[in-house]
Image (cartoon, rainbow, N blue to C red):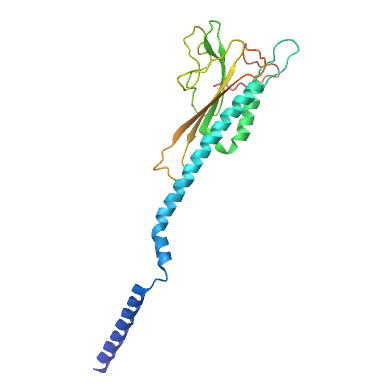
Amino acid sequence: MSDMMHYRRTGGVTSGRFGRFAHRLARSTAAVSAVELGLAMPFLMALTLSGVEVVNLALIHVRLNQLAITVADNASRAKQTQVNGAPLFREFDMNQVFRGAALQAEDLQIPQRGRVIVSSLQVNGSGGQWIAWQRCWGNTAYVSRYGVEGTGLTGTSFAGMGYTTTKMTADPSTAIMFVEVAYNYKPFFLGSLIPSKVIRKEAALYVRDDRDLTGIKNPSPTQPQAKC
């Protein structure tokens, strides 16, 4: 009988204590901020990761655009001066342009994830536009939007280069260094929501000085040709 009464008293005390604790917990506001932060954390993380992804994508666009401009600028300036005759543009010069691009975009992994395409847009014998030569850097299979080396060799059917309605065309006795950059963008965090896509950038500059336009040269000692 005494054991039963002791159990009831103990149980009653325990129940009373639990009830008072539950009542105090229900009225407590000491950890409201922590609870709210815990509830909001998944949404804050998703918002933060989305912001990082958007900023990274914007930076990739800017850097690829700068890369295309730099390659076009360097290709338009490079030359080997000749005592008799117009300066030459050599395979060595083209390889040097690509080495500079590799240093500029080292962390973008262009050889594995993209390609840089340089085309010399000139006027053919019929007065039309043609791609006199073309060189590439990068191991991917991306190709020029406008054609390969030799496109537009004869006739006037080749309109020129450029993704706009009005194509870019070269003037007689000069050339345009037209650069295309294709890059396979892969999201950092939101791969399931933002699919991988190919980002393309273009830039073009006229050759700055006189240049031998009969083709890209490879005098001795010869250099590897960065054929597309």
Q: As drawn, which residue projects farthest toward the top?
A: 126
> Toward which corner of the image does residue 107 lie, by quadrant?
top right
Tag count: 0
Q: Position of residue 175 (x, y in %)?
A: 60, 15
Give the left or right position of residue 38, taking residue 182 as reference: left
Give the left or right position of residue 4, taking residue 208 as reference: left
Residue shown at the point (50%, 43%) measured from the top left: 55
Give the answer, above or below, for where 221 lies relative to 38: above
Give the answer, above or below, for where 217 lies relative to 186: above
Quadrant of the image containing the N terminus:
bottom left
> Toward which corner of the image does residue 190 lie, by quadrant?
top left
Residue shown at the point (43%, 50%) measured from the top left: 47
Give the left or right position of residue 163, taking residue 91 as reference: left
Give the answer, above or below, for where 216 lies relative to 27: above
Q: Position of residue 10 (x, y in %)?
A: 30, 87
Quadrant of the image containing the C terminus:
top right
Nearer to me, 162 or 225: 162
Residue shown at the point (29%, 85%) measured from the top left: 11
Nearer to me, 107 or 125: 125
Give the left or right position of residue 212, taking residue 38 as reference: right
